[in-house]
Image (cartoon, rainbow, N blue to C red):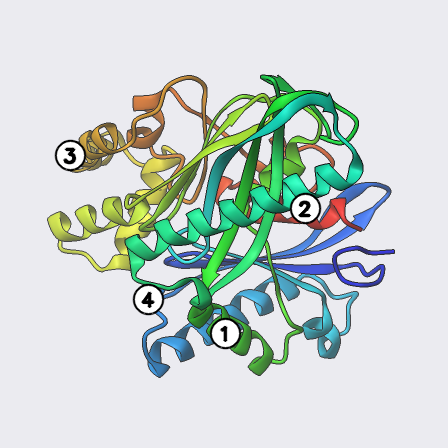
Amino acid sequence: MNKLFGKRETPFLILDIGTKAIKSLIVKKENNKLSILGSGLIYFNGFSLINDFQIQNLSKAILKSVQEASNNFLLFPAKNRKDLPLLLTLSPDILKLRVITESFEREKESRISKSEADNILKDILFKAKKKIANDFTKESGILFNDIHWVNFKVIGKKINGYSVSKVQGCNGKSLEIKVLGAFIAKRYFNIIENICLNLGFRQPRIISLGRGLIASLGQTNKSGIFIDVGGSVSQALLLKDGIIDKVYDFKAGGDRFTQALSEVLAIDEDSARMLKHKYAVNDLSEKVRIRVKNILSSEKDFWEKTVDVRGAVYVFGGASLLPEIKEPFKAAVVYPKHLKNIKSNLNSPQFVPSLLISYYAGENL
């Protein structure tokens, strides 16, 4: 049975709502592989859920993105496209992801029974959730009862310093439990849910980038820093031996480069975004390329000062092809073709976050 949707259903719809763009995918699972049947990409005027006008703009952009994804998916009746199971992810300034490690000391080194293991994990999860919520309240002013928890999951366990797959049945006194928590302010959750339902879609399941990344890696012990370069906010996930160790959000992304080109060259945002893309894929004359490179030099300095990374770095997302982002960290760009068991004609790293979410869905089909 499908653990994610309640019954075995495929195809399904993925929505990735960023700060300036909405990506959509229609995905089908066949023979343990994910086939991308359609994709859509729509830019819109900023991600703000403050007033009715902004909500209306976001609603229109979501609908346009899904319609674009549906255009080359002719085998599925148009009237039923909104009936597809819906998975949704959001920009890290809206959908928060946190990692916390909690310690627990037992009275003696004896075998841990099932009931004791359950009680230990229950206690640790409660304390971890309170700590994450308290930190978020200090940061945002949003109280514990105004938080909607998307996911709260144990992702790592150690007993006496050694990693274990489960607590039950082990001997040891000192426990360290690593927890991954994803959450969103209830106000934003209600708005997003109402938008989807008012557009005629099914109730969305919200999935964090962290869950998708873990699903894509499977049982591999991958280590490194994975950076999703967004529009105005980016997110870095530090992995150690296949487990998310830390999460960093920072206010930097492709918008800064677009804005710099727009201001210096006195062109509109759409023209600046197109010029930025051509520069990133090396589709400009040498003269124009040098001109753009000089304009963006200050943004390269900003990224070097803002993002403190060490070790192997992997980047994806809309602006990840820019030399000013790749070069300071000697980063490898993750393309859709690098993701295993996915059949797709997509070639832009901008769709990698959406594809990572599809991994999570595929794993639970």
| Picture quarter with the N terminus | bottom right
Between the C-alphas of marks 4 and 3, the distance is 25 Å
67 vs 237, left or right, is right
Residue assigned mark 1: 190
Please tell me which of labels 1 and 3 falls first in the chain.
Answer: 1
Residue 190 is situated, as x and y percent measured from the top left of the image, at: 50, 74
Q: Amino acid at mark 4?
A: Asn
Please tell me which of labels 4 and 3 falls first in the chain.
Answer: 4
Residue assigned mark 2: 360
Q: Amino acid at mark 2?
A: Tyr
Question: Is residue 346 visible from the viewing direction of this image?
Answer: no
Residue found 48% across the figure and 39% down from its top: 99
Pick the residue in front: 139 or 338.
139
Q: Secondary structure at mark 3?
A: helix
Q: Are marks 2 and 4 in contact (CB under 8 Å)?
A: no
Q: Nearer the viewer, mark 2 or mark 4?
A: 2
What number is the disc on residue 45? 4
